Image (cartoon, rainbow, N blue to C red):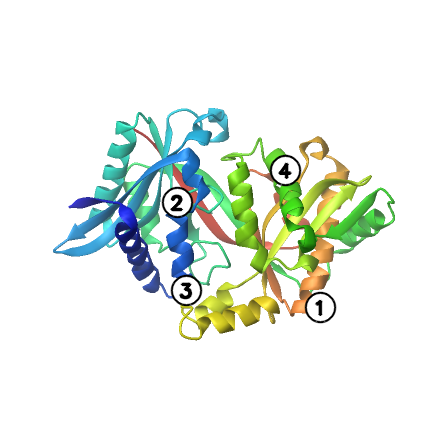
Amino acid sequence: MIEEIGGKKGRARFVDLGRSFAAREQHSVPQLRSEQLELVDPDKNPFFGHASHQFFIARRDSRDVGRISAHIDRLALELPAEQGMGPGTGMFGYFDAEDEGVAKALLARAEEWLREQGMTRALGPISMSVWEEPGLLVSGQDHSPMIMMGHHPADYAHWIEAAGYDRAKTLLTYDLDVTQDFPPLVRRIVQSGERNDRIRIRPVDKSRWAQEVEIVLAILNDAWSKNWGFVPFTPDEIAYAGKKLKPIIREDINMIAELDGRPVAFMLTFPDVNRVLKDIDGKLFPFGWFRLLRWLRKPTAADMRVPLMGVLRELHNSRLASQLAFMMISNIRDNAASRYGAQRAEIGWILDDNQGMKAIADAIESSVNREYAIYRKRL
């Protein structure tokens, strides 16, 4: 039986079921329950301001044995089809199943709901905004994910493909040893940029955080506007993201690049709070909150994740764009290693056809360590 879920109690049941599935995976990291509840709450997450949704739970023998969301992002419907979304595109996410039979039933029910809303294709898993947790982990289950990255058993990919889905896009993450210096060519590019008086690489300023968030997301909305799967941030989402990210932002590992005094690029870096969440089992009480707050005030032995970077489109395919990227990476790497004891960083995700970013990742001698797949199906 597939049951429609709604309301506060229903959302809690939906979240707790997902947590129980995650707990079965050896390398999964328990996340804060309060954060997970907020992400699925239409009164708190501004994503729902431009999206409709339905949550489902599968039951067998009086037990909850799987879950899935079906949702429609109205902003995604307005985008060109060649960018991956576009008219008729619905999505599924928060996919967990006990076995292939449950998976098939859940996917069929999500597809039925999307068809009822007039959708002609399904895309997923995307949970729920493309900016939150896109894709299914298909390679890299042998190590724990970093902050804000999903972790899924290998069987899920087989079950989704068996239900008639094929891969629409692959998202990559790259692993970088930050204790090692960059190759000579990269060092020369960085040194050349440092001699250019037009360029300034500066840390973000949390004393004017609201303005900095607007700068970063304005660049992001421009830089990524032609990328596959791009959906622009709304003003409410910008404010929400700023509020959520501020506690984990360290000024000296988040950079904005200016050209002739104008912000043209940025790079965000987060200390990997998953290390602490694993130690406290994702629970704030009774003492987890103290350990988490203490670590956030001064992250130590903290590996890093670079989730987002962007350069204004007017500079794309120019030498200056790659120079700015290498300069920001160099600044962040030096500070992460010397001030936070970082030994490794994870860059991504990066679209598998983003040749520019893949070239930068290769140039700094990083290597692919995780792959996520987004699947599609005609309805």
Q: Which residue is drawn at 63% across and 37% down?
A: 218
Q: Which amino acid does label 3 sit on?
A: His
* Percent position of residue 263, x then y: 73, 41
Sequence-first tag of 2 and 3: 3
Front-lying residue, 150 or 49? 49
* Secondary structure at numbered mark 1: helix
Q: Name the residue under label 1.
A: 338
Q: Residue at x 55, y 44 (%)?
A: 239
Q: Distance between the residues labelled 3 and 4?
A: 35 Å
* Percent position of residue 291, x then y: 50, 73
Indicate which disc residue 27 carries.
Answer: 3
From this view, report whether residue 159 is shown above or below residue 84: below
Q: How far apart are marks 4 and 2 (CA)?
A: 25 Å
Q: What residue type is labelled 2?
A: Asp
Q: Which residue is drawn at 31% across and 52% down?
A: 155
Q: Which residue lies furthest to the bottom in this view?
A: 287
Indicate which disc residue 43 carries.
Answer: 2
Q: Name the residue under label 4.
A: 218
Front-lying residue, 27 or 157? 27
Instruction: Mark 1: give few (<14), some (14-19) or many (20+) Cα within 10 Å.
Output: few
Q: Which amino acid does label 4 sit on?
A: Ala
Q: Distance between the residues labelled 2 and 1?
A: 42 Å
* Secondary structure at numbered mark 2: loop
Instruction: Mark 3: give few (<14), some (14-19) or many (20+) Cα within 10 Å.
Output: some
Given this view, does label 4 or label 2 mark the residue nearer the observer?
Answer: 2
Q: Residue at x 37, y 66 (%)?
A: 26
* Quadrant into which the C terminus falls: top left
* Percent position of residue 85, x then y: 45, 30
- Asked if the residue at tag 4 contacts the one at tag 3, i.e. Cβ–Cβ closer than 8 Å, the answer is no
Q: What residue type is labelled 1?
A: Ser
- Asked if the residue at tag 2 contacts the one at tag 4, i.e. Cβ–Cβ closer than 8 Å, the answer is no
